Image: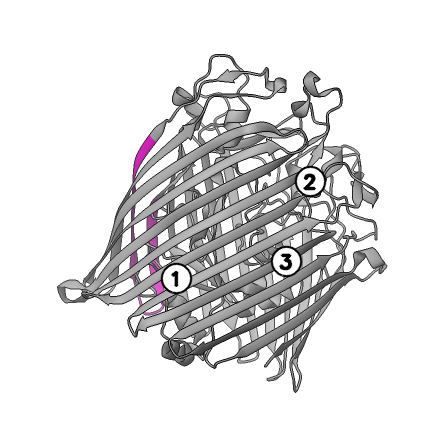
Amino acid sequence: MLRTYFIGLPVSLFTLAASPLAIAESDANELGAITVSATRANSEVGKTSQKVTVITRDEIDEQLRITSDQSQVLSNLIPSYTPSRQKLSNSGETFRGRNPLFLIDGIPQSNPLRDGSRDGYTIDLSMVERIEVIYGASAEHGLGATGGIINFVTRRPESGTLNQHVGVKMTAPTNDIHSNSLGYKVDYRADGIKGNWDYLLGLSYTDRGMFYDAESELIGVDNTQGDIMNSESHDIFLKLGYWISDEQNVELSINRFSLEGKHDYEAVDGNWVNGIPTTSRKGDPQGDPAMNEVLTVGLNYTHSNLAGNHFIAQLYSQSFKARYGGGVFATFQDPAYGTNVYDQSQNESDKIGGKLTLSRDGMFNNRLKLTTGLDLLQDETTQILAQTNREWVPETQFRNIAPFLQAEVSPMQQLTLNAGVRYEYAKLNVDDFTTLASYGSQQVEGGSPDFDETLLNYGLVFQATENAQLFANYSEGFGMPDVGRVLRGINQANQSVEDFLDLQPIVTDNTEIGIRLHNGGAHFELSHFSSDSDLGQRLQNNGGIFEVSRERTEIQGIEADAGWQINPVHYLNATYAHISGKFDSDDDGTVDTRLDGRNIAPDSIQLRWHAKWTSKLDTQLQGTHYFNKDFEGDTNDFSSYQLVDLSLGYALPKGQVTAGIENLLNEDYFSYFSQTATTRDDQNFKGRGRTVTLGYNLDF
């Protein structure tokens, strides 16, 4: 079941270190460790106003019994997250109507300068201990977190000098099993603690087959954005820690993830207007296979009692490379390279950064806690056309410095107030460049525009009664628009980067108010949120290439969560999410047109029943209904569908067997993205039909 806490800013998104002894003692109480490690200021649960959903390892495992699609796991567990595209790209998958910032142990995976929408596939979930989900714009983390934060917290060593794990899985459709539809996965892990050292090594390999819809037809391969079906992925994860003393720890983590298509199927166009799905056939596609290659490195130092303060320092780097499928798009055409030019793009991004945090608690008779810190980031990003070696997006350097101060005050026992300020200074560096021929080969003058913003957040939690809690929160988020899309789309002469308006940052105002009730084994939470930006970002289709429009946007929604632990065996959970948004289409300062499905998720309701039948057997049945949604005009409206999944686990004398059935009722449907975000005949994809996954895990 989901466990939701109110853990306020500032929020630490890498694990708070614990000594080997503390690790051993906390293994039996994982929930307690989660509530501490999620906060940069080590905030006490229930004392601050920011909403955080902690997805535990058990919940991740229950979803991985059903699907290996990481976006599907997120949409199953985060009500306001868009339904999965079931593709390598997460373009169009938004969180509360805006882009989430993906992190691994606090290290940014998102690439806002040229958002290639591949940041959801940078680590295998078998390496993840939990997922921390922070709702709404974050004034503390700033860049990229306009919709919220999704942080993958990696596994930690357990007590003992050597602990090992091995797991295997096989996936297949249930209607007609074909050799090309089979998927396999194997993962291995070793960890332990010896003296002042602790370590963890994780390895995984996944071979994904082709996907079939409910009518046993091959689903179309996405030749443009890339696909997870018919692909192979590898992940190597290493974590090494050393305890200088009981209060000081140094930890190094390295994660190297790669995913690449097998590149031996090609799409067969459907017909979007007539509802004919895109399918696949065996073939030899042009170009090179789509792929992701990501290397993430972090070095953390923690001192839990530095002159009475808690101090954390983190240095990190991330190298990201994503190649996309290609095509003979009008944008790629240039007479200098002949006619009907085939090309494909490749994003490359390198980040280095650091985070410093110093917090002090217990001041003024335990009524005041202060946290201060400094974040530094440098991001260098470019996008090339790989087959002709042309520069589509010029190399862009982004430098960001952001100090912050956060306070938490408890003037009375029932009331907790928090407030903070963060100053953002950002600078872009772009050399002179020439756009592609399709944009008129415009000569664009480079420049170094800089921006600064002062971002505020404040909130409160009022414990009205023993079982009722009221909360309210206001926060501001800071993010860059998709700079690459803006720059590459310049089609007018005499433009300069220095004064190009569309490079102004996105500042998002986020407000939320709600109530939380708890009585014994039952809980209920209801909240209303709004997210407004005077100069937002909206993607629109321009001849098959999505470009950026900068307009005022306003988004609002309602989220509800109810749970009931009926008895030690049975737990029921229900969630509901409604979201809507508009943008200013005529630049008169007033929003007037509904945002489409590329930006807004459908309303949804989800029911989940978890049963622990015996000490060996547990099952989970979950169902999600996505409601009809109408957008502007007569096209791209959404027709509802519902998905039901079943999973079980059974403990053997040695190991555990698992089974999962995705789309149990074999629902025949077109994906939300295909219905609402595109009209292309080569992207009219159906969703996956019923599949079964069998697995075996052994810890020794």
Exactly how many numbered labels are in the figure? 3
* Left/right of residue 335 with respect to residue 5 in the rendered view: right
**Badge 3 amino acid:** His
Is residue 534 in view?
A: no
Q: Main secondary structure of the magenta part?
A: strand
Query: In what quadrant of the picture does the C terminus appear?
Result: bottom right
Task: Looking at the picture, tell me which residue is in the foreground, 378 or 636.
Answer: 378
The answer to which of 86 and 194 lies nearer the viewer is 194
Which region is colored magenta? 451-475
Left or right of residue 558: residue 168: right
Q: Residue at x 55, y 41 (%)?
A: 600
For disc 3, the marked residue is 234
Quarter of the image for residue 658 reads bottom right
Please tell me the numbered disc located at residue 213: none
At x 59%, y 62%, the residue is 607
- Residue 428 in the image: state x and y as whole percent: 40, 31
Residue 54 visible in rendering: yes
Q: Residues within 10 Å of mark 3 (few under 14, many from 20)?
A: some
Residue 651 within the segment the image draws in magenta = no
Q: Which mark is residue 674?
A: 2
User: Which numbered disc flags the more N-terminal residue, 2 or 1?
Assistant: 1
Of the image marks 2 and 3, the number of the one nearer the N terminus: 3
Using the numbered discs, state the Cα–Cα distance from disc 1 to disc 3 in whole angstroms.
28 Å
Sequence-first disc among 1 and 3:
1
